[in-house]
Image: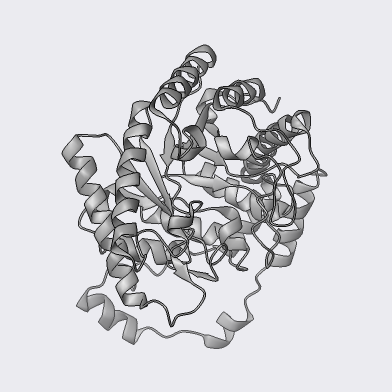
Amino acid sequence: MYDAKPEHKFTFGLWTVGHVGRDPFGEATRHKLTAHEIVHMLADVGAWGVNYHDNDLIPIDATQGETAQIKRDFRKALDDTGLVVPMATVNLFSDPSFRDGAFTSNDPKVRAYAVQKTMNAIDLGIEFGATTFVFWGGREGTETDAGKDPITAIKRSREAMNYLCEYVIDQGYDLRFALEAKPNEPRGDIYNATTGNMLAFIETLDHSDMVGVNPEVAHEQMAGLNFTHHVAQAMEADKLFHIDLNDQVPGRYDQDYRFGSVSIKSSFFLVKLLEDNGYDNPRHFDAHAYRSSNYDDVKAFARGCIRNYLILKEKAAQFNADAEIQALLTEIDAGNDTMGELVGAYSAEKAAALRAQSFDRAALGARGMPYERLDQLTIELLMGIR
């Protein structure tokens, strides 16, 4: 009943189900899988697509012969399973050369290498059919602001993005960019820390039309922010090019839990927002199984991400069809359009009429708002008793 279908566009990254269970305090608990083994695993759980960083697929020190063999094996796995590659990205955070940033590094050679590496990663993404390219600046930040001028860092980021946009245009690629925000970790503070920061930055680019955002649940919630609100801002701006789904306890390190496994109510409102507004780009699960899991349990983790999304999608449809809930929403929004002759699009005539309008302030303050009842009905729906 809650099985994935191609129209759901569920995807996972090679780095997600392929995560070996290593963390800052412990070594790997699972053996490393090849990229083609991961593709077959994802096909088993019903995924539509697979995404990758350049070095998830091709190790940074791979020889030409090794690279060619990896590509052949990966292509065969895609052909055998029917999985697609809708998104690719670049790793500008693991190698020591990027320890103080990539596009914002104080070293001009590092900045140039980062742009070169990104061009190569774009080519690799295009080779396998990607139409979206994500940027996560995990090292673009500081531990001490004594070391970098933030205005200079913004200018360096803009210069790199403008250059890469021009590269894509010059190559004739059918590709758009999606920027991913995070407030901290692995840096003490990361530049463009929220989706709102990214949306503002995008408007300063030379080719802002080809750049959007890739918000991630954990990245906003770890800062205690309401992720659904940030996604709504991106959707309203027509900039939600891609989305990373996982779960997170607010205020903790980046946990990347199975989607819908922690914050059920916020996950519900996120799914409802996406489904009610016709989101039709990939639904990418950027999450990791528990370090205690073996690969059989990793498959259960991946299936759980899919099932939880589809269950919450069903709950959103129930919410929209529930007569009592909809009656409360109608009560709350009663008379919503009655002030159209006074507000909305400005005119001098409306402004004059609004100034002349008399409002009963006491009545406005006394009007009931049945949000407790509405929220309780939502909880009961999610708990399965409606």
Residue shown at 60% from the left, 68% from the top: 223
- Locate residue 309: give its quadrant: top right
User: How is the model colour-coded?
Assistant: one colour
Q: Is residue 363 above or below residue 39?
A: below
Looking at the image, the residue that sits furthest to the left is: 170
> Where does residue 78 sit, x and y in percent of width and height?
49, 19
Query: 291 or 311: which is nearer to us?
Result: 291
Query: 24 or 129: which is nearer to us?
Result: 24
- Locate residue 298: give its quadrant: top right
Could one spot residue 101 in this view of the protein? yes
Q: Is residue 34 above or below residue 201?
A: above
Residue shown at 44% from the left, 38% from the top: 54
Residue shown at 19% from the left, 41% from the top: 169
> Where does residue 209 sit, x and y in percent of width and height?
25, 50
The quarter in which the N terminus is drawn is top right
Q: Is residue 374 left or right of residue 102?
A: right
Could one spot residue 13 in this view of the protein? no
Q: Is residue 51 left or right of residue 161?
A: right
Q: Is residue 65 above or below residue 381?
A: above
Q: Is residue 101 left or right of residue 293?
A: left
Residue shown at 19% from the left, 34% from the top: 172
> Where does residue 361 sit, x and y in percent of width and height?
53, 87
